[in-house]
Image (tube, helix red, strand yellow):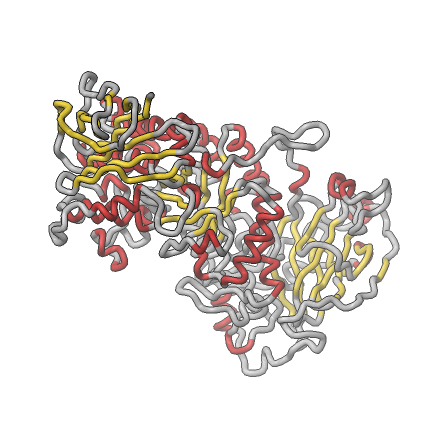
Amino acid sequence: MLRCDRSAAIRSRSCRSASEYAIRVPTGQALSSGHAECPQILIPRPLPAAAWSSAAPARSRCVAAAAAAVDPVTEAGAAGASPVQLSPAVFSPRPAPHLLLAAPFPDCPHGATLWPEAAVAAEGATEGEGGQSGAVAGEVTFKVWAPHAAAVSLLLRDSGSEVPLQRCGDDWSGRLVAGALTPGAAYCVSIRTHDGRTFTRRDPYARSADYDSDWCFLDAPAAFPWSDRAEDGTTSWTPRPFDEYVIYEMHVGSFTTEGTLAAAADRLEHVASLGFTAVQLMPITEHSDAWGYNPRLLMALHGAYGSPDDLRRFVDKAHSLGLGVIIDVVLHHGAVDGNSLWEYDGWGPDWNGGIYHEGGHDTQWGRGYAYWKREIQAMAEAACAVWLSDYRCDGLRFDSANDLPREAIQALTWSLRSRFPGRILTAEVTPENPQSVHELGFDSVWVHSGYFDIIQQHRALGRGHHGGGDWAAGWDLPRLRTVMVLHYGFTGPTQCIKYLLGSHDQVGCRNGGAWYKDYDMIGGQHRYAVDQYGGGRGDWNARASARLWYTANVVAAGLPMIFMGTEFAQSGWWDITPDRRLQWSLSEDEVGRDSMALFAGANALRSSFPALRRGWANILHEDRANGVVAFERVVEGETRVVAVINAGRKFWTATDYGVWVGQAEGRLEEVFCSQAAEFGGGVESGVANEPRPMYDGKIWINLPAQCTLVFQHML
């Protein structure tokens, strides 16, 4: 009889009865994971791997289609298809207890772990002996949490084998002989319940999986040839200091026509050439939605993007170009469609989701995880650590971190900081809250409010695609003030990530560009900056506004970030559809080239002036009537920087605009003008400011319309 597949939707509709989940395993409840003393069964070594593998013909592919899940990138999977489970007609494994060296084998990580020479040597093993784990090179250990199962086995596709695992507490584990499971080989978990049902499941800790079945693929992270690895195995790579980050947010599936990590790696020179120092990848775990925020597994790379080694090659290339890599992780809920963890071991009364979701809160995106269990907390930590260890990424961004339990966040960030010093842990917390840094352990927080405050200023004056005139307050300088300096409660510039031109949340749209109620305060639409500030990339005033606000973003207190495509003034909204993904052709026209020159020039300011990275920000001058504000960035021992923002459309050309810059000796020299002709602006040579002496705390300057000027303080 066919049983339900791993899709939450399919299981919940077709596999429910009043008594189906009434049986609990006598040895423990789902909340328990205490290991009892487990007698280990030592199994004599079998014939060499070559003997049994050559004698066992490869079996047919295990098909376990997730009917409710369709890959949003490749559109693979048939919606409405019947769930097909493992059956003798499709895959007939033969029992292979001889492939076990020991079972149970509780002293190993969860999931399938290949023990390479380096790992065994690090554990102090001698030749022919196991390390502290007991494993030797080439062996694979496997452990899975399934407290309500009656029996669990590991299915190996290539050899057509079924390897029985043994229980220890709530885990099932075993140690396989060398060669039983090799890198890239397929495996999955078979579970039999106490009421006689048998079905397959994925490995919750898998690094790679087939999108349309339960087959997972063994990864070998230690075998990857990192380009900076020395003969002794050491590597020279170290993460950047946090203050050096200038972040470029990227969606792998729509960054290139191919939508793969390999294709994205080939385009990384573009990002590095503009002065960005980090790429932040939107979620890359296997997902059932369009953008990656509905994870089916927490550690498996989305197959349409490539293999685990493709991600390592991407990171290796990024590091060689001086780019860090930050991964967006989604830990507060599972996928609605095709959730591989839903009712994992067959238990799940009252629609509670089973062992991984029991007691988890409902979110607007899906059921939360059962963070009150230590098994879930351990899995969440592993889902973070995998990117920092196996892939050597430089940091993480925690999506919707305010939907995670406070105690779980604190434990998670504390552990990650201890294990991976120097990696940046950033969070989306709405509204932004300094307690996220001071109490929860994050290094930096996304600041949404600055974007909305800027767009509202344009709407107030009747500019942008959304019109305006309904708010006649004029320039709201208190709002501009908080955009430029640190928001209340934050104590250092690296604690805030600011994106005045928008992130994927503001630029992306899944409903064809239509109106959103929660964006009503800025006109109700998600758009690229040149549309929010005017009539799109063909509108000179809109481009001028985008230039001035990105320059302001770079010199403001915080870490600057943009979303892909903003650098060459892409218009409209972003989505994964062919007509809305990144339009590389826009980088080749005059508007695109001018815009990229602006981004490169502005980003270079942060490497030239340390005060922009580490300095305190103080407001110096405010002119509400004209929309002008000036502020300074200062840090001891470094050159003081003063920025003057003219958000209005009045142009002072006769050095007749006075800016209060504070009582100090010396002069101010202009080092950057967002309206320079080389950036597509209207300021020609001769209009730019020569070094200006300070009189009674003021300098008198030429001030172009819709422009940010940057000055250095010279003695």
* Point 49% across, 56% down: residue: 439
Asked whether, in this view, residue 610 is left or right of residue 674, the answer is: right
Q: Give 512 or 46, whichever is nearer the viewer.
A: 512
Q: Quadrant of the N terminus?
A: bottom right
Q: Is residue 407 visible?
A: yes
* Point 54% across, 57% down: residue: 410
Q: Give 548 or 312, whichever is nearer the viewer.
A: 548
Query: Where is residue 251 drawn, in percent x and y?
Result: 42, 43
Q: Give 412 or 636, whichever is nearer the viewer.
A: 636
Q: Give 361 or 342, whichever is nearer the viewer.
A: 361
Outermost residue toward the right in this view:
44
- Say which quarter of the image contains residue 166: bottom right
Q: Quadrant of the C terminus?
A: top left
Query: Where is residue 446 drawn, in percent x and y?
Result: 39, 48
Asked whether, in this view, residue 486 is left or right of residue 333, the answer is: left
Count of picture labels:
0
Query: Where is residue 576 drawn, in percent x and y?
Result: 37, 46
* Point 58% across, 50% down: residue: 416
